[in-house]
């Protein structure tokens, strides 16, 4: 249930000092007392500031100086000649909020931040968009700003697409600029004002579509227009899983009055357990039915090694924890998100350290150290039956589905585990000590840290490292660090106003089928 940036391509187109060397058995890794997690607050802050300074360096290398558009990725040596020739709305949003973080943490002066952001906003104002919805296409050339119709790497045809979740992340960046850079509030607001997330909302399903094309694409699409204008061609799928990153688009639409509040309860915490219709999903959920705003909701949860939680779609970290970098879900949802987010982190740690025995944890879509890009996650905490897996061998768990599908033996072993550092940064708010130890162990045991901070992913079994920097993943790192070092600066625009007025009450209503002390 994801569409962000490079995931769209595959669909269509971690300072504890441990004791083992790179490539040694991961289970031998162990923290020692001089980890920053065990140090003073000042020492921890110094480590975080260094991480931020180095991560920002990767953004500076990825940005085209003429357009202010950030490339999707760059090589590990930060050579501008190795920047990708494509970018997305998500990448641009990540650059905008990362520039604000760089200013707020003293990495760049206010004037430089303003100039950088102004250049980007100017280019955004000139990009080709879908005028009726105000939405941006998914792929542009960062050097020219032209919408891509041919993929730079291989010349294949690109069918221009307008993604709900990717436009959501761009809108987040614009909202942050509007709040944090008063001199640029007006142009940021002008760009935001034309974005209509209601374009994606299907009232019959109370869910949003993955996006749409202006021209009919190859394969499945649904002609129509939820705003009543000329037909566009929607994805056949909706974003139906609740605990996934597209909910940022839902929140923005509800806050703007473009999507009704009932939509919050229109997506699935899990699918209903009755019968065998959903026997293809990961496991039969536990829970109960409740009604909010006239919408009947199955408050489902999954059980995993003594924990009980609302799953994501694939079991990855960014699905569950990218949104609360910005929206204070755990503050507004004391009986839901406040319990689920730290439990989800515990599940990821449990898998990496105990179930799979890698010695490290943090599984989320990232570059594949063996080449390409791949979804990684913890299979049992995702709804998708096939699941995102934590290793290269795609080792899955099958708990069965009652009488509909028999359980299978648990895996005897896991293979080459792939850990991405951005997952630990996402966990920083909920398990700071664990996250800092994990990051330090990765840095100590592998060649996992370069001039732009942590490289994107590590095969912790073989010691193979993907030495590239990705704008999305670095953006999550910068967001987590900015919040930790600058008093939740990136949450500020979303902690009041329409978001608080219209979205917070929905979160306060809900009670997940998990309870404090139950896990």
Image (tube, grey):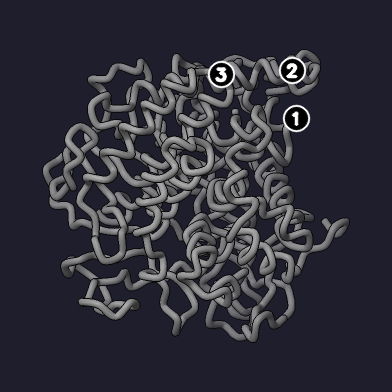
List the residue tagged with mark 1.
433
Mark 1–mark 2 distance (CA, rounded to whole Å): 9 Å
Q: What percent of the width, then of the height, locates residue 312?
A: 58, 58
Residue drawn at (65%, 79%) of the image = 297
For marks 3 and 2, the one nearer the N-term is 2
Mark 1–mark 3 distance (CA, rounded to whole Å): 24 Å
Mark 3–mark 2 distance (CA, rounded to whole Å): 25 Å
For marks 1 and 3, the one nearer the N-term is 3
Q: Which one is in front, 483 or 189?
A: 189
Residue drawn at (27%, 77%) of the image = 222
For marks 1 and 2, the one nearer the N-term is 2
Q: What percent of the width, then of the height, locates residue 31?
A: 74, 21
State whether residue 490 is above or below residue 323: above
Per the image, label 3 sits on a secondary structure element best described as loop
Q: Which one is in front, 371 or 217?
A: 217
List the residue tagged with mark 2.
35
Instruction: Check contact, mark 1 vs mark 2: CB within 8 A.
Output: yes
List the residue tagged with mark 3.
106
Q: In which quarter of the image is the C terminus?
A: bottom right
State whether residue 54 is above or below residue 489: above
């Amino acid at each position: 249930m994801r569409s962000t940036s490079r995931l769209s391509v595959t669909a269509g187109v971690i300072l504890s000092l441990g004791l083992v060397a790179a490539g040694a058995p991961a289970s031998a890794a162990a923290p020692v007392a001089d980890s920053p997690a065990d140090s003073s607050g000042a020492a921890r802050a110094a480590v975080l500031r260094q991480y931020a300074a180095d991560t920002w360096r990767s953004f500076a290398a990825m940005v085209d100086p003429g357009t202010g558009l950030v490339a999707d990725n760059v090589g590990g040596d930060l050579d501008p000649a190795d920047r990708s020739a494509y970018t997305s709305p998500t990448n641009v949003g990540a650059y905008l909020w990362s520039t604000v973080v760089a200013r707020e943490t003293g990495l760049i002066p206010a004037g430089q931040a303003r100039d950088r952001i102004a250049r980007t906003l100017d280019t955004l104002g000139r990009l080709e968009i879908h005028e009726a919805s105000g939405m941006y296409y998914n792929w542009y050339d960062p050097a020219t700003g032209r919408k891509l119709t041919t993929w730079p790497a291989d010349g294949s045809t690109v069918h221009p697409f307008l993604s709900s979740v990717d436009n959501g992340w761009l809108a987040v960046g614009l909202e942050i600029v509007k709040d944090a850079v008063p001199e640029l509030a007006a142009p940021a607001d002008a760009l935001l004002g034309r974005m209509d997330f209601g374009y994606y909302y299907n009232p019959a399903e109370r869910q949003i579509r993955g996006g749409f094309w202006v021209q009919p694409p190859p394969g499945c699409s649904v002609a129509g227009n939820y705003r009543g204008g000329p037909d566009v061609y929607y994805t056949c799928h909706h974003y139906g899983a609740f605990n996934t990153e597209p909910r940022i688009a839902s929140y923005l639409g509800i806050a703007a009055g473009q999507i009704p509040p009932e939509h919050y309860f229109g997506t699935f915490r899990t699918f209903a357990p009755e019968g065998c219709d959903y026997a293809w999903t990961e496991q039969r959920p536990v829970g109960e039915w409740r009604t909010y705003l006239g919408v009947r909701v199955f408050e489902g949860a999954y059980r995993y090694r003594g924990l009980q939680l609302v799953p994501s779609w694939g079991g990855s970290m960014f699905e569950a924890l990218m949104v609360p970098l910005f929206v204070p879900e755990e503050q507004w949802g004391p009986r839901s998100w406040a319990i689920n987010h730290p439990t989800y982190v515990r599940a990821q740690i449990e898998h990496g350290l105990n179930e799979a025995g890698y010695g490290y944890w943090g599984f989320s879509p990232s570059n594949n150290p063996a080449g390409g890009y791949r979804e990684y996650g913890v299979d049992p905490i995702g709804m998708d039956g096939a699941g995102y897996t934590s290793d290269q061998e795609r080792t899955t768990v099958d708990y069965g589905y009652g009488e509909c599908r028999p359980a299978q033996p648990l895996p005897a072993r896991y293979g080459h585990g792939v850990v991405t550092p951005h997952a630990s940064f996402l966990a920083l708010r909920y398990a700071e000590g664990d996250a800092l130890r994990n990051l330090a162990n990765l840095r100590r045991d592998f060649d996992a840290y370069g001039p732009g901070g942590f490289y994107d992913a590590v095969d912790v079994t073989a010691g193979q490292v993907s030495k590239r920097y990705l704008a999305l993943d670095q953006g999550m790192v910068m967001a987590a660090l900015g919040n930790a070092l600058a008093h939740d600066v990136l949450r500020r625009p979303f902690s009041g106003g329409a978001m608080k007025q219209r979205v917070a009450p929905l979160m306060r209503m809900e009670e997940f089928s998990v309870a404090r002390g139950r896990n």
